[in-house]
């Protein structure tokens, strides 16, 4: 495929982008190329929506795949077509930034089961002509990565220079390194784990139950019946957002300050700033996210366990891996604590893999990887520069 083809691609308008100059590229896979799922089902036809930034070099050796987190999408470094906000990782990706689009060809796709153009529960089921709803098959992290590999194949790229992501994105990074070690030169899993903890599964179940308890959910048929479980989804988002922050960050940002008043109202209005903030997070989230997608993506994270098929021995998942790893954690992240990252590092060491590790001291909690964090920027830039020299992308 010529480089010109990569720039034009196969265009199709996706959710929220009608008549927008910021359309995503979409690649469609027909019945002859089904996505084989861990559940045993073959998903076909299906499509992947994605964005690219920068130029692929003549050797096709400078591609970086960015894997998004639970509520992210392909708009990593461009204005979001629904919200109008900047890309979710514009602090990290762009010209002159740690993931430098003047040097690297950056790819970011919406995961399968997402809701920004890739096939998911809100997509039309060709068998019925209606949205899939809960008829959509359950997806795993490995299924997401298989679909991404098909996209990378479509782009004519044999080996990715790097795969980078945080949280659910970090899980995808680890799965890439396990499933396709020869196709990943270096991997940067940030604020993640090789399996979801019981506590995290519990948090997700509370969120799912909030969605399903909304009478407008209609057993997942809300699109067909013309309703929207926005209240339940907003509550799920509020609960999840608390886990993304630390106690120190919440206290620093809000404390116990009242919202636009000096005294309590002795009611159940949003008296406190933190209450108002969470309500805003919930209400803004439902404008851009699908409730059923939330169910499917949280379940995919719950099922993730890289050691499961290796009799619980994590090192076996990375045995003799040629991939170079940079594992990053944050001191105040209680959703994916540093102990989880250390377990990854120990397993990689036991497997004989090349790995560096950084624990960043910050009070910003799990969301630190998305925020202005100079030490993280320096670590990613330095690691990619070093890997780039080894790959021949950066002059010594």
Image (spheres, rainbow, N blue to C red):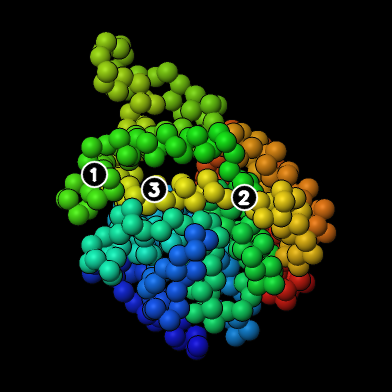
Q: Is residue 315 visible?
A: yes
**Helix, strand or loop under label 2:** loop
- Tell me which numbered mark, 2 or 1, is placed earlier along the sequence: 1
Task: Give coordinates of residue 185: x percent, y percent.
Answer: 69, 69
| 58, 300: nearer the viewer | 300
- The residue under label 3 is 294
Left or right: 74, with 388 as reference point: left
Residue mark closest to the camera, 3 vs 1: 1
Q: In which quarter of the image is residue 257?
A: top left
Residue at 26% x, 21% y: name it: 269
- The residue under label 2 is 305
The CA distance from mark 2 to mark 1 is: 31 Å
- The residue under label 1 is 218
Left or right: 119, with 360 as reference point: left
- Tag on residue 330? none
Task: Give coordinates of residue 370: x percent, y percent.
Answer: 52, 47
Task: Give coordinates of residue 333: x percent, y percent.
Answer: 59, 36
CA neighbours of label 1 inside 10 A, class few (<14), some (14 to 19), many (20+): some
Q: Can residue 106 be seen in this view?
A: no
Residue mark closest to the camera, 2 vs 3: 2
**Helix, strand or loop under label 3:** helix
């Amino acid at each position: 495929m010529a480089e010109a083809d990569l720039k034009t691609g196969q265009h199709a308008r996706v959710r929220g982008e009608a008549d927008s100059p910021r359309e995503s590229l979409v690649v469609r896979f027909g019945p002859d190329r089904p996505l084989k799922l861990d559940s045993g089902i073959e998903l076909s036809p299906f499509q992947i929506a994605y964005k690219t930034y920068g130029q692929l070099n003549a050797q096709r050796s400078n591609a970086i795949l960015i894997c998004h987190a639970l509520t992210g999408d392909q708009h990593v470094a461009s204005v979001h077509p629904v919200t109008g906000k900047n890309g979710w990782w514009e602090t990290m990706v762009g010209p002159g930034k740690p993931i430098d689009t003047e040097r690297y060809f950056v790819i970011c796709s919406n995961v399968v089961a997402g809701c920004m153009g890739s096939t998911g529960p809100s997509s039309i089921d060709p068998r019925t002509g209606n949205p899939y709803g809960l008829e959509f098959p359950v997806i795993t992290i490995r299924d997401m990565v298989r679909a991404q590999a098909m996209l990378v194949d479509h782009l004519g790229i044999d080996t990715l220079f790097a795969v980078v992501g945080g949280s659910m994105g970090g899980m995808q990074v680890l799965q890439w390194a396990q499933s396709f070690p020869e196709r990943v030169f270096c991997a940067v899993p940030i604020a993640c784990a090789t399996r979801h903890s019981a506590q995290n599964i519990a948090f997700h179940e509370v969120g799912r139950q909030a969605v399903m308890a909304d009478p407008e959910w209609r057993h997942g048929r809300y699109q067909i019946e013309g309703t929207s479980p926005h209240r339940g989804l907003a509550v799920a988002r509020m609960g999840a957002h608390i886990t993304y922050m630390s106690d120190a960050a919440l206290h620093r940002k809000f404390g116990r300050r009242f919202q636009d008043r000096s005294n309590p109202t002795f009611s159940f209005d949003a008296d406190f700033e933190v209450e108002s903030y969470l309500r805003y997070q919930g209400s803004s989230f439902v404008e851009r996210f699908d409730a059923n997608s939330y169910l499917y993506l949280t379940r995919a994270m719950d099922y993730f366990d890289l050691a499961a098929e290796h009799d619980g021995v994590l090192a076996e998942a990375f045995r003799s891996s040629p991939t170079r790893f940079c594992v990053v954690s944050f001191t105040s992240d209680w959703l994916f604590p540093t102990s989880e990252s250390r377990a990854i590092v120990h397993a990689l060491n036991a497997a004989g893999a090349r790995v560096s590790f950084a624990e960043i001291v910050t009070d910003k909690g799990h969301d630190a990887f998305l925020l202005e964090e100079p030490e993280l920027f320096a670590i990613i830039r330095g690691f990619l520069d070093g890997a780039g020299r080894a790959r021949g992308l950066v002059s010594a």
